[in-house]
């Protein structure tokens, strides 16, 4: 099992930046995949970025603007978000899969004003 706690969300103007953090309650060095999802009001949860065994995948809508990274020493996964757009507004969730079990954090709200 693992507990995930996201932080770093907030209100930002379009074009601004935020860095989300996801702190895990245990070592993440052997956990794969790890990633970030988001859910906007009235929409389904969607994959934003994911690391699987060193391979990184991004949603087309965030390519070139968002960067996912992990710090195994700090048991933390990050999502650097640049050039934010109003359509990036959503609750962002950290996600990990350990064996056949999927774990989610509580989510952090990101609001981008135009």
Image (cartoon, rainbow, N blue to C red):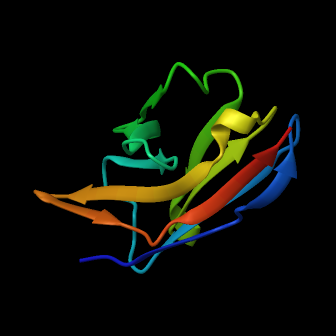
Drawn side of residue 84 relative to residue 89, left or right: right
Furthest residue toward left: 100
* Residue 111 horizontal/vertical position (percent): 73, 53
Residue drawn where x is 81% and y is 32% of the image: 83
At 29% from the left edge and 65% from the top edge, which residue is drawn?
A: 103
Question: In the rendered view of the protein, which quadrant contains the N terminus?
Answer: bottom left
Say which of 3 and 108 sits in front. Answer: 108
Percent x, y of residue 21: 62, 63
Residue at 50 percent of width and 69 percent of height = 75
Q: Position of residue 34 (x, y in %)?
A: 39, 50
The quarter of the rendered structure image containing the C terminus is top right
Q: 11 and 83: which one is in front?
A: 11
The part of the image, by quadrant, that contains residue 110 is bottom right
Taking 99 as reference, is 37 above or below it? above
Would residue 29 be found to the left or right of residue 66 on screen?
left
* Image x and y of residue 47, in percent: 41, 38
- Rendered position, 17 above or below 77: above
Left or right side of 13 for 67 = left
Can residue 24 be seen at all in this image of the molecule?
A: yes
| Residue in the foreground of this view, choosing between 72 and 51 | 51
Q: Residue at x 52, y 19 (%)?
A: 60
Tally of numbered tags: 0
Judge from the rendering whether residue 56 lies leftward or rightward of residue 99; answer left or right.
Answer: right
């Amino acid at each position: 099992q693992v507990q995930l706690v996201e932080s770093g969300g907030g209100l930002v103007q379009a074009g601004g930046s935020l860095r989300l953090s996801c702190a895990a309650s245990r070592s993440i060095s052997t956990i794969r995949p790890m990633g970030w999802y988001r859910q906007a009001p009235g929409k389904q949860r969607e994959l934003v970025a994911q690391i699987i065994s060193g391979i990184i995948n991004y949603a087309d809508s965030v390519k070139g603007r968002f960067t996912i990274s992990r710090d195994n020493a700090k048991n933390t996964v990050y999502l650097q978000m640049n050039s934010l757009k109003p359509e990036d507004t959503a609750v962002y969730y950290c996600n990990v899969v350990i064996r056949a079990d999927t774990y989610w954090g509580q989510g952090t709200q990101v609001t981008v004003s135009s």
